[in-house]
Image: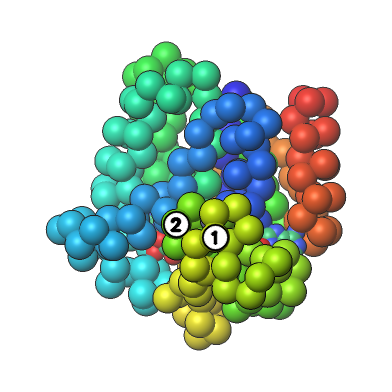
Amino acid sequence: MKLILLGPPGAGKGTQAKMLTEQFFIPQISTGDILRAAVKDGTAMGLKAKEFMDAGGLVPDEVVVGIVRDRLQEKDCINGFILDGFPRTVPQADALQASLAEMGKELDRVISLDVDAEALVERLTGRRTCKECGRGYHVTFDPSSVVGKCDACGGALFQRDDDQEETIRKRLQVYADQTSPLINYYRDAGVLLELDGMQPISQVQEKMLSLLQAS
Ligand code: AP5
Ligand code: MG
Ligand code: ZN
């Protein structure tokens, strides 16, 4: 299955992608996670990307397009993949189409998660992530059993630098301006599935699986 999860910051792309990887044994490709790893490693690309990420803006198309093109060539993508946070602009979507065509592949589905702006702010300000394994939590909606500690691996939980309210609002605006046109882009391509992301995590998961099975 070759999937894109589309949706604003905090819609639950990462949360649902992790569930789908276990369900379908295909990798989650999160450009945000790849960029944060590059920032942590202090690579030249990471240093450049950090400025854009801290400001809540988008990293230039050519950087992320190159990352995804290389990642899709890796062996674990042979049976499919879940793109989380890519594409985010029309040029990125066009570049993805070209990369897949070169590999003789085609997208199966794009799932668009719809969530109200105020709920997104609440989700992002309360998000916590495990430093070791990357599992996501929410202080209210999906808390760990021990405060500050990952249930899965015991790692310390941290808050992302860009999850401050001012940066969150900037990211939501960038989504509305630059990424939301992709909803029509993929609707026109006949691959869009729309899902109400305002329900609890487990219900979104159930609906997503039944939509994928029905399509
Ligand atoms: P990225 O890491 O992709 O961030 P994002 O798109 O802003 O999305 P988030 O990760 O914030 O949200 P999510 O939808 O994954 O939500 P989650 O499941 O964690 O990108 C970061 C930055 O990198 C960008 O700003 C940009 O600078 C750069 N970048 C990345 N990709 C790029 C690209 N393609 N082009 C250019 N630049 C790029 O859930 C959020 C919280 O809500 C969690 O705490 C979770 O527990 C909770 N939650 C989830 N679902 C529910 C639910 N149903 N009910 C209640 N709580 C829920
Ligand atoms: Mg995410
Ligand atoms: Zn962990």
Question: Could you tell which of marks 1 and 2 lies nearer the N-terminus?
Answer: 2
Q: Can the viewer see residue 119 in this picture?
A: no
Residue 115, how many percent across, how many down? 73, 63
In this rendering, the answer to whether 16 lies above or below 40 is above
Q: In this view, does 16 lie to the left or right of 64?
A: right
Which quadrant holds the N terminus?
top right
- Furthest residue toward bottom: 166
Q: Residue at x 82, y 41 (%)?
A: 206
- Residue 189: image quadrant is top right
- The mark closer to the camera, 1 or 2, is 1
Residue 95, how many percent across, how many down? 37, 36
Q: In this view, does 116 lie to the left or right of 183?
A: right
Q: Name the residue under label 1.
A: 154
Residue 16, how many percent across, how many down? 66, 47
- Furthest residue toward left: 44
- Furthest residue toward top: 104
Nearer the observer, 22 or 172:
22
Which quadrant holds the C terminus?
top right
Crowding at mark 1 (Cα within 10 Å: few <14, some 14-19, many 20+): some
Crowding at mark 2 (Cα within 10 Å: few <14, some 14-19, many 20+): few
Assign a secondary structure to mark 1. Answer: loop
Counting every numbered tag in the picture gives 2
Q: Mark 2 points at which residue?
A: 132
